[in-house]
Image (cartoon, grey):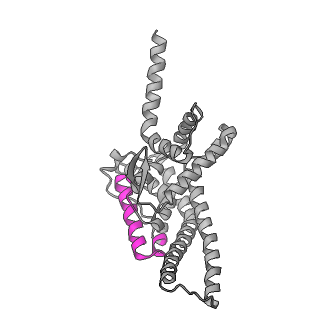
Amino acid sequence: MVAKDKLKGLKGFTFFRSFFESGVVLKEKDRRSLFEAIVYFAFTGEVIEMTSAARACFIAVKPNIESSQAKSIAGAKGGASKKARESEEDAEQSENKLDENTKQVVCKLAASVKQTVSNKDKELDKDKNKSLVLSDSSFRSAANDQTDETETDETHEQIKQRVKEQITYTDFLITHKNSIKLVDEIVAIITDTLLSEYESIVISGVKKDKAVVDDNLLKLEHRHIEYVINNFLALNKRVTKKTKYVLNMLFNSVNEIDLHYTNAVNADNADKLK
C-alpha cells in the first residue's frame, strides 16, 4: 500500500481493462460510483462512499490500483525499480485473473440488487392489494428468488475470499491454528461490514460514515489481525457483544498498531537501562 503523502505528486495511473469491463455491466449510477471511487483512491489513497454494487467491484480491483500507484510513483522518480517492475508484472497477471472473477462478482451483485428492488416493489403491491392470487408468474418469481439467493451467497464468498487474501489468511492456519475459529469470525465480520447497506456504523459509541469504516477495513493487513487476536485473547472479562467489540478493535487497529509497538519498544529499552 502506497502512503498517502506520496500520492500528492502522482500525475497518472494505469486504468486496467478489467476496471472498464467491470463498470460497463453495472447500471449508470453504480458505474459512475465505481469509476469515481477508483480515480479518487488512485490519487488520494482514500476510499469514498459508493453504491453496494460499486463497493463489491472496488474491493476486487483495489490491489491492481495499488500496484498501478507504485508503478507510477517509481516511474516519476526516473525509471521503475526492480521491485516496481515486478509489481507491474504481478498487477498485469492478476489483472487477467481478476478480469473474469470481477465481472462475475459484479454481475451477481447486480442481479441481487435488482431482485432487492423487485422485492420492495412487490411489498408495495401487497399493501395496495391484500388479496394476492398465485399465478404462473408468481411461481416463476419464487423460483427466481431462490436462484438470486444462491447468487448472493456466491457474491458473499467472492468478497470473503478477497478479504482472506488481503490479510494473508493461509499464514494464520500455521501460526494461529488453535485460534483459527476466531480468525474466521473476524473475516466474517469484515465481509459483512463491507457489504452492509447502512449509511453509517457505530464505532466505539460514535456514529461514523460507512465510507470511513470501509476505508479502515480495506487497510487491514496480517499484522492488524494478529494484533486484534492477541488483544482479544488477553481479555480477562466477558464480552457480551462480541461482533461489535471485534469490529471496534479492527477499525481502531489501523491507527493504534504503530503506537502500540513503539510504546512496547520504548518500554523494553527503559527496562534494559534500569
Q: Residue at x 44, y 26 (%)?
A: 263
Is the stretch drawn in magenta largely helix, strand or loop? helix
Is 252 situated left or right of 153 in this image? left
Judge whether residue 124 is colored magenta.
no
Is 171 situated left or right of 79 in this image? right
Extreme top residue here? 274
Q: Residue at x 46, y 53 (%)?
A: 67
Please give the range of residues in magenta. Answer: 21-49
In the foreground, 77 or 176: 176
Q: Residue at x 53, y 36 (%)?
A: 227
Q: Residue 71 location in percent, x, y?
A: 42, 52
In the foreground, 260 or 41: 260
Extreme left residue here? 9
Q: Quadrant of residue 3?
A: top left
Judge whether residue 40 is colored magenta.
yes
Q: Relative to 9, say whether 131 is above or below.
A: below
Q: Residue 140 location in percent, x, y?
A: 63, 85
Q: Residue 144 location in percent, x, y?
A: 62, 80
Q: Residue at x 58, y 56 (%)?
A: 160
